[in-house]
Image (cartoon, coloured by chain):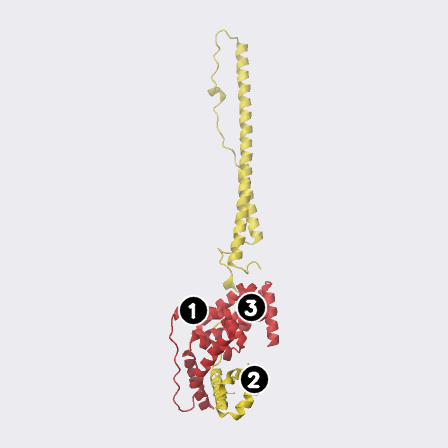
Chain colours: A yellow, B red
């Protein structure tokens, strides 16, 4: 076998098999060229190893260090804090919807609106009073119907606001949850 | 070495389950070696520090993708390799084939600091790939198979790069070491 077939470098780094090692050792005993080459390889390695490893100028930041904490505006709300604030906001809206006084429509006194009926000629005083009474009853009925309609509209509006707010709250919570898991994979751990 | 591998595997397993302290321990264990590996590739402490930091962060974020937790070190060095060469490509887009380093003239015995300078100068004359092969084998002590994993190339390529680099270095450094004896 020629000298080139012996892998001295693999031998030097301890990567030769046991069979290869024995063959190289046997060959090097009788081959001055290979023995010299091996010595030069060892000297080269010794030179390289004389340059020591350096200490890093500072330690690598741990993933638990403050530096990896999200900025305040990126920080997802904690579940308790988030639910608390949403509940408080919901209460405020409902309270506002229920307790805000309805717009008061100031009505002119009946007297100023309804003119005193002039008694047409040929009608008795009793007939006039009956007409007035019937007119008043009709007005009360209309007023009661208007109040009922207003109450129904207000209840519908409150229900609509609550439903919209629930939907908004859900989206808000999901958005923060998705953003947090995308930006900070470790945040949820 | 066997115990070390077992410990790494165990720590990776814990880190995957959300134990941040286990990963911090892996960082403490490997930061010096990874930093020096990168430093010898890029030649600048601040760049090496930044790349090492990025490598550890990327490793943490992709810990779930590590197939064999026992192979954490080659996998981590693979990430560091990618980050380093990304920087090298940006800073040095094209480089010609490196020539053979000039052998030093014979002279008196060299001081350790002079040897250190000569070694660094000789390493700088190598191509980045050759230099990396020397760093991984001589300074980091990886086996050929592990080097192939880190460099994502066949063992034959690893050996070719390393052996060529050693032949170039030998011409410069062996006489220095012989003088120092």
Q: Give the mark nearer the N terminus: 3 vs 1.
A: 3
Q: Residues within 10 Å of mark 2 (few under 14, many from 20)?
A: some
Q: Which mark is residue B24?
A: 3
Which of labels 3 and 2 is toward the front? 2
> Could you classify mark 1 by the number of other residues whose Cα lies within 10 Å: few (under 14), some (14-19), or many (20 or more)?
some
Circle 1 chain:
B
Q: Which residue is found at the position 45% from the left and 72% from the top?
A: B48
Q: Which residue is mark 1?
A: B87
The CA span between labels 2 and 1 is 40 Å
Tag shown at residue B74: none
* Other-residue count near label 3 (Cα within 10 Å), few / some / many at <14 / 14–19 / ≥20: many
Q: Are marks 3 and 2 in contact (CB under 8 Å)?
A: no
Element under disc 3: helix
Residue under the image location 46 percent in, 90 percent down: B178
Q: Position of residue A107 (x, y in %)?
A: 48, 25
Tags 2 and 1 both on a single chain: no
The label on residue A20 is 2
Q: Position of residue B5 (x, y in %)?
A: 59, 73
């Amino acid at each position: 076998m020629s000298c080139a077939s012996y892998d001295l470098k693999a031998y030097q780094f301890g990567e030769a098999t046991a069979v290869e090692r024995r063959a190289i050792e046997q060959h090097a005993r009788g081959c001055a060229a290979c023995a010299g080459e091996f010595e030069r390889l060892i000297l080269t390695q010794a030179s390289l190893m004389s340059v020591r490893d350096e200490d890093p100028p500072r330690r690598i930041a741990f993933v638990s260090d403050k530096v990896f904490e999200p900025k305040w505006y990126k920080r997802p709300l904690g579940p308790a804090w988030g639910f608390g604030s949403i509940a408080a906001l919901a209460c405020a809206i409902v309270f506002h919807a229920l307790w805000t006084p309805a717009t008061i429509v100031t009505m002119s006194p009946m007297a100023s609106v309804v003119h005193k009926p002039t008694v047409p000629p040929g009608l008795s005083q009793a007939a006039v009073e009956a007409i007035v009474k019937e007119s008043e009853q009709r007005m009360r009925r209309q007023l009661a119907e208007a109040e009922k309609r207003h109450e129904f509209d207000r209840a519908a509006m409150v229900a609509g606001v609550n439903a919209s707010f629930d939907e908004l709250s859900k989206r808000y919570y999901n958005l923060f949850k998705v953003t947090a898991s995308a930006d900070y994979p470790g945040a949820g751990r | 070495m066997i115990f070390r591998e077992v410990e790494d595997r165990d720590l990776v397993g814990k880190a995957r389950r959300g134990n941040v302290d286990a990963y911090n321990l892996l960082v403490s264990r490997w930061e010096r070696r990874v930093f020096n590996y990168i430093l010898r590739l890029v030649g600048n402490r601040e760049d090496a520090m930044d790349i090492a930091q990025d490598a550890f962060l990327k490793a943490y974020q992709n810990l779930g993708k590590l197939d064999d937790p026992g192979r954490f070190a080659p996998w981590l060095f693979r990430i560091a390799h990618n980050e380093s060469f990304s920087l090298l490509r940006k800073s040095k887009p094209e480089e010609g084939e490196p020539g053979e380093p000039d052998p030093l003239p014979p002279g008196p015995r060299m001081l350790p600091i002079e040897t250190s300078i000569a070694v660094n100068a000789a390493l700088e004359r190598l191509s980045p790939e050759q230099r990396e092969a020397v760093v991984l084998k001589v300074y980091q002590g990886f086996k050929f198979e592990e080097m192939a994993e880190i460099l994502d190339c066949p063992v034959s390529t690893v050996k070719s790069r390393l052996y060529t680099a050693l032949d170039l270095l030998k011409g410069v450094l062996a006489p220095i070491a012989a003088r120092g004896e």
